[in-house]
């Protein structure tokens, strides 16, 4: 039996709604380039007071080498496996790397940070989001 519901278009979200969704999640994906090729890495993150995306990485990692001072994308979202409904938010901005805890939203003092870890802050320049409609069965 077919549903008479038709899928609705993706619904764009305002900046405030995007921030609220990002603040309520903790895993996303950083999109950057390595040798002019796209790379995507899942990461744990949190949202700073100014809307920046904050994460940590190994100081000598490919991620840190690739994103320091670069324009990167960050995406987080959730999709319900049962009906396909969910959301997606993308942040575009420059990434700053700090080894000394200079990011004011970094809760750990420099001595409390795991050895060899640095902080990465993605400062939002463009934030977009969409609600994903459910998919009729």
Image (tube, grey):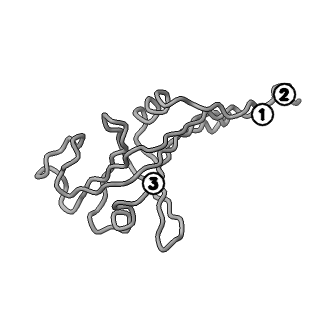
Residue 73 at x, y percent in the picture: 48, 52
- Residue for point 49% across, 31% down: 15
Residue 134 location, quadrant? top right
Determine the residue located farthest toward the left in the rendered image.
111
- Asked whether the beta carbons under mark 2 and mark 1 sit within 8 Å of each other, the answer is yes
Local packing at callout 2 (Cα closer than 10 Å; few below 14, some 14-19, many 20+) is few
Q: Is residue 3 left or right of residue 104?
A: right
Local packing at callout 1 (Cα closer than 10 Å; few below 14, some 14-19, many 20+) is few
**Mark pair 2, 3: CA separation:** 37 Å
Choose the circle earlier in sequence order: 3 or 1. Answer: 3
Checking the image for residue 137, the label placed there is: 1
Q: Nearer the viewer, residue 78 or 81?
A: 78
The residue labelled by disc 2 is 3
- Asked whether the beta carbons under mark 2 and mark 3 sit within 8 Å of each other, the answer is no
Residue 92 at x, y percent in the picture: 47, 48
Choose the circle earlier in sequence order: 2 or 3. Answer: 2
The residue labelled by disc 3 is 30
Q: Is residue 88 left or right of residue 44?
A: right
Instruction: Label 1: state its secondary structure.
Output: loop
Instruction: Label 2: state its secondary structure.
Output: loop
- Residue for point 18% across, 60% down: 115
Determine the residue located farthest toward the bottom in the rendered image.
35
Q: Is residue 13 left or right of residue 122?
A: right
Q: Is residue 93 left or right of residue 77?
A: left
- Residue for point 46% across, 70% down: 34
Residue 124 at x, y percent in the picture: 41, 43
């Amino acid at each position: 039996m077919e549903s008479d519901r038709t899928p609705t278009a993706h619904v764009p979200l305002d900046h405030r709604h995007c921030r609220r969704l990002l603040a309520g999640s903790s895993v996303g994906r950083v999109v950057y380039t390595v040798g002019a090729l796209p790379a995507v890495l899942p990461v744990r993150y949190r949202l700073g007071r100014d809307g920046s995306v904050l994460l940590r990485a190994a100081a000598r990692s490919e991620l840190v080498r690739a994103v320091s001072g670069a324009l990167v994308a960050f995406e987080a979202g959730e999709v319900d496996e049962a009906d396909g409904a969910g959301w997606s938010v993308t942040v575009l901005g420059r990434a700053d790397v700090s080894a000394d805890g200079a990011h004011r939203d970094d809760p750990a003092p420099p001595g409390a940070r795991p050895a060899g870890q640095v902080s990465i802050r993605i400062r939002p320049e463009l934030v977009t989001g969409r609600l994903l409609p459910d998919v009729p069965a």
